[in-house]
Image: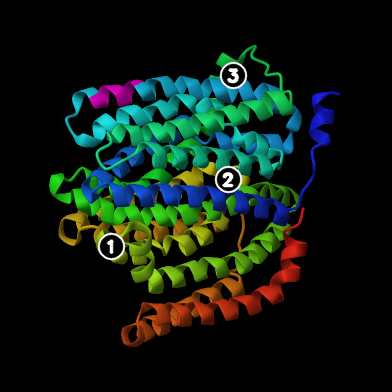
């Protein structure tokens, strides 16, 4: 059987089933991550926990720099032309290797020259950069085989969490913590290789891969910079506090712990657009009206769960944060109440950002994200000395809002106009009203009662809207 026949024989699944598959896999994965970091927060003192978060945040920049947006590019190409996979795969792997080696050398040099505590930890976590060529989930995304994406993610995070629980104690060398992360990445790389070369029996065409990799870089660098600036948007608040000095070590923990929770929740936002990207690209080829209809329906549905997360996080933070990270993290409640608003902001902006990517307008997507990232960095530097962890948390949300507004403007100018879905506006209004009611009840009857009231009202209205939109979801997002 030829490759084309093998790929054609893969099971076809609609959008809803693909998302449910990813949702289930990532729910397990993020539960593993939360268990691992909650354990670390309780076992390590806040200052040492802050060192770990700073090191991992810095490493993210290097990993995303090596990935250089090739995942989104590769998925788009494979979705349109699956027969291109044997030629595309080795070119992406070679290009990532080209970028990975100098990145690891830079991390090692930084560790040798710096006396800061996070530097020694960064040197170990940098080993995960070398495994980036084998992070080929983009192949499965392009083929719409999301069950393999989910399985790989589950394996990676299960291995990471297991290693943390088994190996880390209060006096453990912090390099063991990041070594557990490297071990999880290695497990994912091994799984991907088994599926690619064992299950799909892909035979890479290595001939000319080195020269073609350089040409490929000219195609993908805007997406790579977008990933890099995305990391700056999300991780700069932690890094800014981490490098302001020893006096801010605990402040890192107060903002890193909430960001860790919200990033876990944000994974489901990313998965939504990871799954929606092929649909956006397909609808754009059919015409702007089909694309507008998809975006309106998607936004009308998606903003309700986003609003529920914001309501539950804002009103329930005094219960949630100490319950996960322990009583020492009461100071992280306010940063969490701020950072949790990145979920609805990101879910809103994603419709425009991923439209720009699907339309091949990644330069604009990068520019809008870059402005948002610069906003976050500059505002974090300005607010951190006086406001502590709450300042960078507010800066993160401000950067997200700036990115959302600019992405919407860019999409309207270079792709087409998309009127705001009535359901999205309604979700935002109801969320604000429910939060006001929930906080008022919390002051008189405690956070449990306030959270129940706020989430109960919002959930009831959201369920009513979901019933109305169920048919729209089946018809509009299937395929």
Magenta span: 105-111
Q: Residue at x 45, y 42 (%)?
A: 161
Assess disc 3: are there few (<14), some (14-19) or many (≥20) residues with their C-alpha within 10 Å of its C-alpha.
some
Q: Position of residue 452 (x, y in %)?
A: 47, 79
Q: Position of residue 71 (x, y in %)?
A: 57, 36
N-terminal of the two: label 3 or label 1? 3
Q: Which residue is mark 3?
A: 212
Q: Residue at x 86, y 24 (%)?
A: 1
Assess disc 1: are there few (<14), some (14-19) or many (≥20) residues with their C-alpha within 10 Å of its C-alpha.
few
N-terminal of the two: label 1 or label 2? 1
Whether residue 262 appears in magenta in the rendering, the answer is no
Q: CA distance from mark 1 to mark 2?
A: 43 Å
N-terminal of the two: label 2 or label 3? 3
Whether residue 106 appears in magenta in the rendering, the answer is yes
Residue 391 quadrant: bottom left
Q: CA distance from mark 2 to mark 3?
A: 22 Å
Q: Secondary structure at mark 3?
A: helix
Q: Which residue is mark 2?
A: 357
Q: Position of residue 372 (x, y in %)?
A: 38, 52
Residue sticking out furthest to the left: 247
300 or 197, nearer to the observer: 197
360 or 393, nearer to the observer: 393
Q: Can I make out residue 38 in this image?
A: yes
Residue 449 quadrant: bottom left
Q: Which residue is mark 1?
A: 327
């Amino acid at each position: 059987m030829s490759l084309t026949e093998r790929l054609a024989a893969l099971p076809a699944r609609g959008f809803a089933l693909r998302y449910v598959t990813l949702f289930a896999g990532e729910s397990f994965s993020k539960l593993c991550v939360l268990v691992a970091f909650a354990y670390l927060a309780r076992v390590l003192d806040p200052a040492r926990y802050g060192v770990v978060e700073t090191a991992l945040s810095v490493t993210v920049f290097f990993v995303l720099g090596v990935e250089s947006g090739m995942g989104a590019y590769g998925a788009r190409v494979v979705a349109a032309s699956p027969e291109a996979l044997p030629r595309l795969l080795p070119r992406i792997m070679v290009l990532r290797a080209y970028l990975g080696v100098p990145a690891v050398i830079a991390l090692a040099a930084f560790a040798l020259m710096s006396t800061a505590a996070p530097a020694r930890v960064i040197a170990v976590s940098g080993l995960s950069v070398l495994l980036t060529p084998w992070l080929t989930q983009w192949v499965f995304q392009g083929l719409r085989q999301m069950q393999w994406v989910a399985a790989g993610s589950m394996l990676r995070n299960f291995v990471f969490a297991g290693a943390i629980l088994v190996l880390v104690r209060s006096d453990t060398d912090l390099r063991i913590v990041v070594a557990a992360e490297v071990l999880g990445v290695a497990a994912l790389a091994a799984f991907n290789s088994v599926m690619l070369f064992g299950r799909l029996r892909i035979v890479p065409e290595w001939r000319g891969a080195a020269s073609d990799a350089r040409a490929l870089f000219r195609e993908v660098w805007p997406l790579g910079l977008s990933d890099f600036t995305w990391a700056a948007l999300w991780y700069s608040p932690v890094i800014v506090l981490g490098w302001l000095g020893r006096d801010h070590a605990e402040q890192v923990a107060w903002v890193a712990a909430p960001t860790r929770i919200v990033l876990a929740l944000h994974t489901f936002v990313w998965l939504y657009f990871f799954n929606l990207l092929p649909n956006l690209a397909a609808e754009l080829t059919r015409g702007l009206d089909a694309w507008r209809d998809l975006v309106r329906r998607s936004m009308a549905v998606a903003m309700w769960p986003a609003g529920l997360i914001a309501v539950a996080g804002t009103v329930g933070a005094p219960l949630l944060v100490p319950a996960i990270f322990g009583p020492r993290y009461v100071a992280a409640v306010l940063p969490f109440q701020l950072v949790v608003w990145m979920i609805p902001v990101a879910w809103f902006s994603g419709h425009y950002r991923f439209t720009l990517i699907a339309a091949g307008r990644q330069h604009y997507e990068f520019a809008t994200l870059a402005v948002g990232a610069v906003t976050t960095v500059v505002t974090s530097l300005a607010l951190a000395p006086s406001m502590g962890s709450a300042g960078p948390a507010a800066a993160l949300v401000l950067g997200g809002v700036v990115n959302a507004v600019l992405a919407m403007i860019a999409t309207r100018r270079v792709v087409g106009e998309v009127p705001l879905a009535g359901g999205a506006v309604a979700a935002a209004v109801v969320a604000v009203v429910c939060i006001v009611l929930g906080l008022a009840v919390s002051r008189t009857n405690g956070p449990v009662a306030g959270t129940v009231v706020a989430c109960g009202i919002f959930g009831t209205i959201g369920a009513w809207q979901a019933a109305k939109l169920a048919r729209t979801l089946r018809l509009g997002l299937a395929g």
